[in-house]
Amino acid sequence: MEFTDATIIQLLKRRDETGFEQVFKFYFKNLYRYALTILQDHDQAEDIVQNVFYKLWDKMDSLNFQDSLAAYLYRAVYNESLNHLKHKKVKLTYQTYITRSMKDQTDGAHRKVMFSELERRLQTAINELPEQCRTIFQMSRFEELRYLDIAHRLGISVKTVENQMGKALKLLRTKLIDYLPFLVLLLLNFLNHRP
């Protein structure tokens, strides 16, 4: 008995397993090769073709073949392959977005922790400075007074203010050496985001 498209379609519509098996054996390898040219992935190509045959069997009653069975199968493999590639692209885009979001959140949280730790260490280091040195440093950095104004307020020479500031900065640098790279990054970030 010669199997024409019409004969095969009738067998499939009657859910004839022998007819289905014949169609599967006849078309599988070529459809697999076709899917492989689109997907460039052996496992995915095989999955796509098997999925097309599953849908063929599952929805046989509702399918209308306007072209040949071969044309239908190739079109189905093509569409399934494109859908897979689109899904893969969407999935990759989403994964990239999630990865970036998590990295940004992690980086932001890490910066907050580092900044809090830096503030704590800086305050501890300032508190450990000798009294006159600490007073001069705080007046210069926090009250933003000039050396001459500090000297007048404290009744000391400008040279003493300069020496005490140098001593304070040297001691702070030594105590905060582990945070120097973070301070540089923080300063660069601040300078880049200034209006």
Image: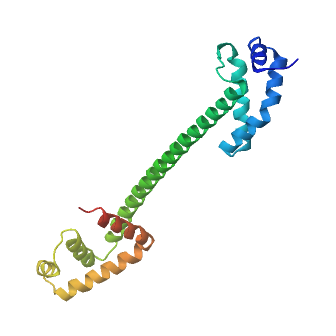
Horizontal side of 91 relative to 105 (left or right) equals right
Q: Which residue is nearer to you in this view: 25 or 153?
A: 25
Q: Residue furthest right?
A: 1
Q: Residue at 68% across / 46% down in the picture? A: 40
Horizontal side of 153 relative to 4 (left or right) equals left
State the image coordinates of residue 42 (x, y, percent, origin top left).
74, 43
Q: Quadrant of residue 159?
A: bottom left
Q: Which residue is nearer to you in this view: 148 or 18?
A: 18
State the image coordinates of residue 180 (x, y, percent, origin top left).
41, 72
Q: Quadrant of residue 122?
A: bottom left
The vertical placement of 24 against 8, above or below, is: below
Number of callouts in the render? 0
State the image coordinates of residue 92 (x, y, percent, origin top left).
55, 45
Q: Residue at 85% across / 18% down in the picture? A: 18
Q: Quadrant of residue 76?
A: top right
The vertical placement of 30 against 140, above or below, is: above
Quarter holding the C terminus?
bottom left
Q: Residue at 70% across / 22% down in the picture? A: 56
What's the colour scheme?
Answer: rainbow
Quarter holding the N terminus?
top right
Q: Which residue is nearer to you in this view: 188 or 111?
A: 188
Horizontal side of 98 relative to 117 (left or right) equals right
State the image coordinates of residue 131 (x, y, percent, origin top left).
27, 75
Q: Which residue is nearer to you in this view: 152 or 184?
A: 184
